[in-house]
């Protein structure tokens, strides 16, 4: 009986020290396994005098039951602790602020400038038309009186996709397309066309892709004075009424006469600065009276109607308008830059 009590004390103390499920299993084997301490006691029952057996057997059974209950309780407590530790380590703090998705809001300065330009010309009765960026040699060059040996057709400037097919180098291709489509229906034309154009050119002030806005007006009795009046009005609106405008003689195969148009530098007001490279003037567009050969290729009678056309670089307009001296800023999409507009 005293051996029994010693065993009980030792076992209960052992259970009190258990701290892992593995330890619980080892304890179970040690006391209740085939060679376990409690098992051994039960086996020794046969060696006792028959009179002592029932009382001793009952005691051993009580001990076994007590130890099994204690052991089960210890195992439960260990599982609880392990679960609590795991929950603590995997805790998610749902009160932390979430990651914000930025929403687009303002128009890109190129788009803004393009929209404003289109608004101005639409207000003058011009209708916006579209044309493809992948263009045929015919509409980009031939129909615009650009001979096969003209430098503009050189591989150096043009991205050719295959012979006869290219990325348009200017929006003037839409002039040729629209004339061809409309000359049998309308005696006159008043269109603008805006979009991407491509040239094999890349440095601080040139990117292989940029935007142009093209204009074409055909009617009876149109003269260079109409071209000047239209452009002066539009440019004073897009910049400021006080801007000075200068027309210089120039050359384009599809216009005759041809002009290039400068505006007084918005930065220095003709004093000379880095934006205008000291000249006081900024070149912003090419224009001219539509060449008679282009008119007749497009299906119009140059003896009856005449017209003017112009093409401007939208990036150039935006740079002047917002006084930006690095073209690359437009394409890097740095939010610190973009969100200023
Ligand atoms: N297409 C010419 C260019 O890209 C601009 C232009 C358009 C000139 C219309 C005259 C008339 O440089």
Image: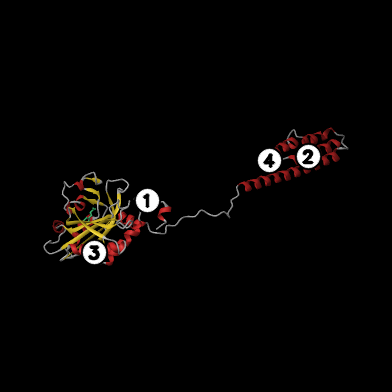
Q: Earlier in the sequence, mark 1 or mark 2?
A: 2
The residue identified by callout 2 is 13
**The one of 15 and 192 positioned closer to us in this rendering:** 192
Q: Secondary structure at mark 1?
A: helix
Q: Measure the alpha-carbon separation of dots 1 and 3.
A: 31 Å
Q: Earlier in the sequence, mark 3 or mark 2?
A: 2
Give the number of the disc on residue 329.
1
Nearer to us of marks 1 and 2 is 1
Q: Measure the alpha-carbon separation of dots 3 and 4.
A: 90 Å
The residue identified by callout 4 is 21
Q: Is residue 44 visible?
A: yes
Q: Is residue 205 above or below residue 128?
A: above
Q: Earlier in the sequence, mark 3 or mark 4?
A: 4
The residue identified by callout 3 is 230
Q: Quadrant of residue 143?
A: bottom left
Q: Is residue 117 above or below residue 28?
A: below
Q: Measure the alpha-carbon separation of dots 2 and 4.
A: 17 Å
Nearer to us of marks 4 and 1 is 1
**The one of 231 and 209 positioned closer to us in this rendering:** 231
Q: Residue 120, how many percent across, how many down?
A: 29, 64
Q: Secondary structure at mark 2?
A: helix
Q: Earlier in the sequence, mark 4 or mark 1?
A: 4
Task: Using a 10 Å C-alpha cutoff, classify the residue at mark 2 as few (fewer than 14 neighbours), some (14 to 19) or many (20 or more).
Answer: few
Q: Are marks 3 and 2 in contact (CB under 8 Å)?
A: no
Q: Are marks 4 and 1 in contact (CB under 8 Å)?
A: no
């Amino acid at each position: 009986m005293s051996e029994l009590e010693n065993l009980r004390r030792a076992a209960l103390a052992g259970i009190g020290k258990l701290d892992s499920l593995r330890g619980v299993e080892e304890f179970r084997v040690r006391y209740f396994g085939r060679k376990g301490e409690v098992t051994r006691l039960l086996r020794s029952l046969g060696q006792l005098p028959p009179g002592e057996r029932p009382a001793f057997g009952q005691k051993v059974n009580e001990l076994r039951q007590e130890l099994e209950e204690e052991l089960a309780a210890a195992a439960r407590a260990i599982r609880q602790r392990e679960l609590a530790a795991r929950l603590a380590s995997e805790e998610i703090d749902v009160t932390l602020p979430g990651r914000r998705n930025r929403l687009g809001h303002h128009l890109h300065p190129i788009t803004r400038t393009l929209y404003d330009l289109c608004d101005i010309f639409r207000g003058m009765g011009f209708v916006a038309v579209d044309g493809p960026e992948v263009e045929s040699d015919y509409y980009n060059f031939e129909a615009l009186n650009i001979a096969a040996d003209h430098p503009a057709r050189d591989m150096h400037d043009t991205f050719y996709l295959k012979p006869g097919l290219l990325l348009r180098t200017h929006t003037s291709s839409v002039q040729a397309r629209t004339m061809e489509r409309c000359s049998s229906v309308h005696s006159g034309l008043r269109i603008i066309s805006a979009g991407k154009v491509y040239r094999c050119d890349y440095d601080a002030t040139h990117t292989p892709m940029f935007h142009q806005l093209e204009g074409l007006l055909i009617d009876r009795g149109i003269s260079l004075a109409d071209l000047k009046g239209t452009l002066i009005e539009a440019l004073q609106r897009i910049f400021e009424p006080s801007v000075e405008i200068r027309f210089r003689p120039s050359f384009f195969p599809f216009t005759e006469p041809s002009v290039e148009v400068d505006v007084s530098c918005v930065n220095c007001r003709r004093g000379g600065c880095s934006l205008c490279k000291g000249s006081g003037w900024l070149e912003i567009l090419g224009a001219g009276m539509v060449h008679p050969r282009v008119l007749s290729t497009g299906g119009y009678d140059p003896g009856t109607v005449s017209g003017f056309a112009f093409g401007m670089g939208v990036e150039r307009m935006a740079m002047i308008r917002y006084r930006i001296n690095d073209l690359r800023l437009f394409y890097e999409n740095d939010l610190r830059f973009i969100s200023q507009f």
